[in-house]
Amino acid sequence: EFPNSKIIIENKQSRYKQALSLRKELGKIDFSFAFRSAFSSKIILHILKTKQRYFFDKNKHKEEHQVLKYLYFIENSLSIKAHFKDLKLPFKLKFQNPLILRNGKKILGLNPGASFGSAKRWDASYFAKVALNFSQSHDILIFGAGKAEQELCNEIYQILKEQNIKVKNLCNKTTIKTLCQNIAFCDLFITNDSGPMHISAVYKIKTVAIFGPTKFTQTSPWQNENAKLVHLDLACMPCMQKTCPLKHHKCMKDLKPQRVIKEARNLLKL
């Protein structure tokens, strides 16, 4: 859709050197936008020597959805009227997947991880209970990445295997593209507030999104009418902390599997 655009993946270990190389490659740059408020973003745009630089202010439009915040940022920077659309990914998927068990069952995807911190993660045993409830009608795919999520995914996998449930653990076994492709195949997706949750929104997957310490009004699945947000209403929410500052983690521990199962079953009726 945007043939003149180019996606460059940042190397965090050498981001400033990479920015210098990019400046040499691109030459003159008219506009640059930093969608993060981090000081490192300002340094990168300074290295690029862009004529006009714009920096996102996280303190503006605090209660709006993150997508709208970014749109307002562009509007205010360029004095234009922006129009939001459905989410899209910058590549096309080939809808064939050898990883899925081909036995006619529907697919339930579980995403127990969340990179922000452990406070965003629903308990692994809770995910397993949800999967067990749907195991007669669904095969199970488990998604995740990184060491911390590997442990969560392995725990769920072992619980399900002990019950002779057909399950595939795809943690650390996918690229970004194959992760998207596998999520696109799911008939139902149970997830924490995370990147894969937003991938499911792209494909309008029936999704139960579990929220605890973060602001669901700002990071909910964008324009996915098939998504259901599940959360408690505790006085300590949302704390926006990586780990529970009160040490009890009630926003997740007190959110029981039966609540998620109920919402998932309601979604499947649609």
Image (cartoon, rainbow, N blue to C red):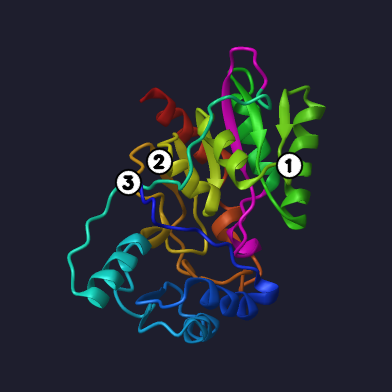
| CA distance separating discs 3 and 1 | 28 Å
Check residue 114 for magenta coloring.
yes
The residue carrying mark 2 is 227
Measured as percent of width and height from the top left, residue 61 is found at 29, 73
Q: Residue at x 19, y 74 (%)?
A: 79
Please report contact status of discs 3 and 1: CB closer than 8 Å, yes or no: no
Q: What amino acid is labelled 2 in the image?
A: Ala
Q: Which mark is residue 173?
A: 1
Measured as percent of width and height from the top left, residue 9 is found at 58, 62
Give the residues drawn in magenta, as a range.
101-123
Q: Nearer the viewer, residue 139 or 93?
A: 93
| CA distance separating discs 2 and 1 | 26 Å
The answer to which quarter of the image holds residue 29 is bottom left
Label 2 residue SS: strand
The residue carrying mark 3 is 86
Q: Residue at x 40, y 41 (%)?
A: 227
